[in-house]
Image (tube, helix red, strand yellow):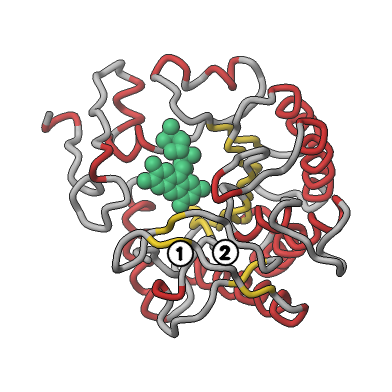
C-alpha cells in the first residue's frame, strides 16, 4: 500500500520526470526494487491475493491496510515456477528503471522483506534447492542479483542487506549463524562485481569488517539513529566508503550544502513519515528559505 511501482509504461513515464530532475541537479539515482513477500495483506493487493513467501509462515506482525492495522496472514509458499517468475519480474522492473532514466537499481535484500525471508531460517523452511543449508537459503538472493547483472549490467546494480535485523519477525539465529550466513552470501555476491554493497548495520563490527574485506567495490554503511557528528565514523574507521543518509536527507533538501557549510539541520517530523502526501516529503525548506 502506498508504494510506488516501476513495471508499467505509465510508471516509467512518471519516474522519468524524477530521474530527469535529479540529473539536472547533478545527482544520480538508483531505484530500490522491493518485493515484500509475507509482509503484506490481501487487502493491500488489487486482486485480494494472499502474500507469497519462501514458506507458509506468518511474520506475526501488524501491517497497515486501507482499513487500519491488521495481522499479517499466513502466506502462500512460492513454487519453483513462482520463484522463476518472481526473478523475471525483478528483471522487468530493473529494465523499466533503466528505461525511466535511472542510473541503476538497488536490490532490497534487507529489513524483513522477501529476499531477507529466504535468508532467514525462521522464515524459510523449504526442503528444495532454496532452503535448508546456508548455500540454499542464499540461492534466491544470488539468482536475483545475477539476473539483474545480466539484464542491465553489474555496475548498475547495488544490493542492500541487513544482517541480524529483526524487522518483520526475522530471527537469523545466534552471532555465529549470522556471520556464517552473510560471509557466504557476500562471498557469492562478490563474484558478480556489483556497483555496491549497502549494509543496514545493527552492531556486529567484526562481521562488518569481514564483509568489507570480501567485497570488491564500494561499501555503504548506515546505522539507525546516528547524530550529525557520527555520520562519517564508519568512513573514518575504514569500514565504509559512503555514508548513506535517510531521514537527514528527507528533512533537508540541501543536506550536502548544509553539512559542507556546517549549517543547522531541519529536524525530521516523525508524524509525517510514511504519510503518502507532500507534507513531510517535499515541503522541508532549503537553507535560503529557513
Ligand atoms: C519513512 C522511512 C521509510 C523507509 N523506507 C525504506 C525503504 O523503502 N527501503 C529501505 O531499504 N529502507 C527504508 N528505510 C530505512 C532507511 O533507508 C534508513 O536505513 C534508516 O532510516 C536509517 O538511516 P537514517 O538514520 O539516516 O534515517 C526507511 C526509513 C524511514 C524512516
Q: Say if disc 2 is inside 8 Å of ligand 1.
A: no
* Rendered position, 143 above or below 28: below
Classify mark 2: residues with Cα within 10 Å, few (<14), some (14-19) or many (20+). many
Q: Secondary structure at mark 1?
A: loop
**Cβ–Cβ under 8 Å for marks 1 and 2:** no
Kindly report the distance in space between the C-alpha atoms of the residues bearing marks 1 and 2. Answer: 30 Å
Residue at (77% x, 58% y) in the render: 142
Residue at (30% x, 45% y) in the render: 273
Please state, as top left, top right, bottom left or bottom right, where the N terminus lies in the image. bottom left
Ligand 1 visible in quadrant: top left
Q: How many marks?
A: 2
The tag earlier along the polypeptide, 1 or 2, is 2
Residue 157 occupies which quadrant of the picture?
bottom right
Instruction: Tell which of 131 and 150 is nearer to you.
Output: 131
Residue at (79% x, 34% y) in the render: 179
- Mark 2, residue position: 38
- Mark 1, residue position: 101
* Rendered position, 284 above or below 170: above
Amino acid at each position: 500500500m502506498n508504494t510506488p511501482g516501476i513495471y508499467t509504461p505509465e510508471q516509467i513515464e512518471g519516474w522519468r520526470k524524477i530521474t530527469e530532475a535529479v540529473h539536472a541537479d547533478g545527482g544520480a539515482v538508483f531505484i530500490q526494487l522491493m518485493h515484500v513477500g509475507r509482509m503484506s495483506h490481501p487487502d493491500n493487493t488489487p486482486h485480494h491475493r494472499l502474500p507469497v513467501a519462501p514458506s507458509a509462515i506468518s511474520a506475526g506482525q501488524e501491517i497497515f491496510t486501507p482499513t487500519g492495522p491488521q495481522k499479517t496472514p499466513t502466506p502462500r509458499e512460492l513454487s519453483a515456477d513462482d520463484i522463476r517468475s518472481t526473478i523475471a519480474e525483478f528483471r522487468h522492473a530493473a529494465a523499466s528503471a533503466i528505461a525511466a532514466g535511472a542510473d541503476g537499481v538497488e536490490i532490497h535484500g534487507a529489513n524483513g522483506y522477501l529476499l531477507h525471508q529466504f535468508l532467514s531460517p525462521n522464515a524459510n523452511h523449504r526442503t528444495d534447492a532454496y532452503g535448508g543449508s546456508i548455500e540454499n537459503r542464499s540461492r534466491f538472493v544470488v539468482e536475483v542479483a545475477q539476473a539483474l547483472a545480466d539484464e542491465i549490467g553489474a555496475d548498475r546494480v547495488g544490493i542492500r542487506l541487513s544482517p541480524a535485523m529483526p524487522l518483520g519477525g526475522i530471527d537469523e539465529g545466534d552471532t555465529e549463524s549470522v556471520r556464517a550466513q552473510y560471509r557466504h552470501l557476500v562471498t557469492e555476491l562478490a563474484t558478480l562485481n556489483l556497483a555496491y554493497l549497502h549494509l543496514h548495520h545493527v552492531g556486529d563490527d567484526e562481521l562488518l569488517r569481514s564483509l568489507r574485506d570480501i567485497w570488491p567495490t564500494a561499501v555503504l554503511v548506515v546505522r539507525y539513529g546516528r547524530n550529525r557528528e557520527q555520520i562519517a565514523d564508519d568512513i573514518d574507521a575504514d569500514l565504509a566508503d559512503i555514508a548513506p543518509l535517510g531521514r537527514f536527507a528527507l528533512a533537508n533538501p540541501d543536506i550536502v550544502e548544509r553539512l559542507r557549510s556546517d549549517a543547522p539541520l531541519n529536524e525530521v517530523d516523525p508524524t509525517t513519515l510514511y504519510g503518502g502526501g507532500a507534507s513531510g516529503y517535499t515541503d522541508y525548506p532549503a537553507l535560503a528559505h529557513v
